């Protein structure tokens, strides 16, 4: 019987939605992980059992088999228990793989499971809001496809900061694949970045997006309402983003929240660790 180091002791939590969405990918992930590590398997029936399994992981390295919601759930639980910094997470995306792929995790079950076994830990920034919610990949009010954001020529709202380089790097490596949130076409929002107003309530906007980077700074894009020709987006970067408006909703990763009238997000630099392929 093979023996494994403590680092190879895995707690594999298979989210119920993964079994329903793609049982074959779950089976493949189990075969690959079982061949390479000593894995304890957990099949929670719902969120409460998911939380209990994660809480009782001991020295085992947690692996989430599931979609973006399952990954966000694991990060949120560890964050609220103040155990996130000391726990490296792995994920095998099954179902909706968009969030995991945007973070650098392979989309296929075989490649993702091999990354769990052979990958390296990468520290990732996190957005934390004033209600203790987290954002791993992207925030949208309402979401805007990255390809649309990249097509427009940006206009700086300040000088002397590396906002443009940070945004381009983020968009190139962390694409957000977010579906639309039902909402009015325009909204009146005040967007402040590090206390500086990017757009105020007197300027209608079509969309606001915020993406955590890898250097403790979030990239912010505001799309003003266009009349006739397409309006050029406003770009900024900072560690704290506050949005104020009348009952707005927002999408954080895979979930829609709100309505709220004010929300502040701050960047938690290097707050969590994700196991990714060594070449990423």
Image: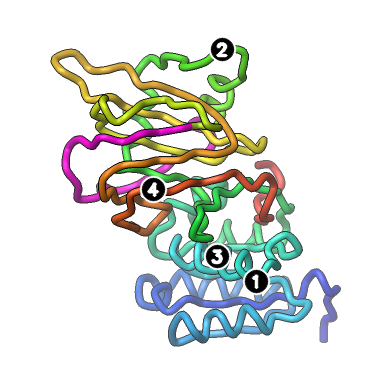
Q: Which residue is mark 2?
A: 159
Cα–Cα gap, marks 2 and 1? 39 Å
Residue 87 location (% of width, % of height)? 72, 65
Mark 1 burial class by Cα count in 10 Å: few <14, some 14-19, many 20+: few
Q: Secondary structure at mark 4?
A: strand
Real-space Cα distance between discs 4 and 1? 25 Å
Q: Is residue 181 above or below residue 78?
A: above
Q: Secondary structure at mark 1?
A: loop
Q: Regarding mark 3 in the picture, which secondary structure is present there?
A: helix
Q: Which mark is residue 81?
A: 1
Which residue: 76% across, 63% down? 86
Report how far apart the C-alphas of labels 4 and 2 lie in the structure.
27 Å
Specify which label sits upstream in the sequence, 4 or 2: 2
Using the image as rendered, state which of residue 207 and residue 171 is in the foreground: 207
Residues drawn in magenta: 171-192
Q: Is residue 199 left or right of residue 130?
A: left
Check disc 3 and report the residue beneath it: 76
Tell which residue pokes out farthest to the left in this image. 228
Residue 262 is tagged as 4
Q: Nearer the viewer, mark 3 or mark 4?
A: 4
Q: Residue 99, position in %: x, y?
A: 46, 52
Q: Earlier in the sequence, mark 2 or mark 3?
A: 3
Look at the image and tell me in which quarter the C terminus lies.
top right
């Amino acid at each position: 019987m093979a023996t494994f180091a403590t680092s190879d002791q895995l707690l594999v939590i298979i989210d119920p939605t993964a079994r329903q969405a793609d049982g074959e990918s779950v089976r493949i992930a189990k075969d690959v992980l079982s061949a390479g590590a000593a894995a304890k398997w957990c099949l929670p029936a719902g969120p409460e059992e998911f939380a209990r399994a994660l809480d009782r992981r001991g020295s085992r390295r947690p692996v989430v088999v599931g979609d973006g919601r399952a990954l966000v759930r694991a990060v949120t639980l560890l964050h609220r228990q103040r155990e996130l910094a000391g726990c490296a997470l792995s994920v095998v995306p099954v179902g909706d793989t968009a969030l995991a792929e945007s973070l650098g995790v392979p989309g296929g079950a075989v490649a993702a499971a091999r990354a769990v076994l052979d990958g390296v830990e990468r520290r990732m920034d996190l957005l934390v809001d004033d209600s203790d919610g987290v954002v791993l990949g992207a925030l949208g009010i309402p979401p805007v496809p990255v390809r649309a954001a990249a097509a427009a020529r940006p206009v700086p709202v300040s000088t002397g900061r590396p906002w443009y380089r940070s945004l381009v790097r983020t968009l190139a490596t962390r694409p957000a694949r977010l579906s639309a949130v039902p909402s009015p076409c325009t909204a009146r929002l005040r967007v402040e970045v590090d206390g500086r107003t990017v757009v105020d309530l007197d300027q209608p906007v079509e969309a606001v997006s915020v993406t955590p980077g890898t250097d403790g700074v979030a990239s912010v894009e505001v799309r003003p309402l266009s009349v006739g020709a397409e309006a050029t987006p406003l770009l900024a970067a900072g560690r704290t983003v506050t949005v104020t408006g009348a009952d707005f909703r927002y999408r954080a990763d895979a979930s829609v929240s709100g309505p709220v009238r004010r929300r502040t997000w701050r960047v938690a630099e290097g707050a969590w660790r994700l196991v990714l392929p060594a070449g990423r």
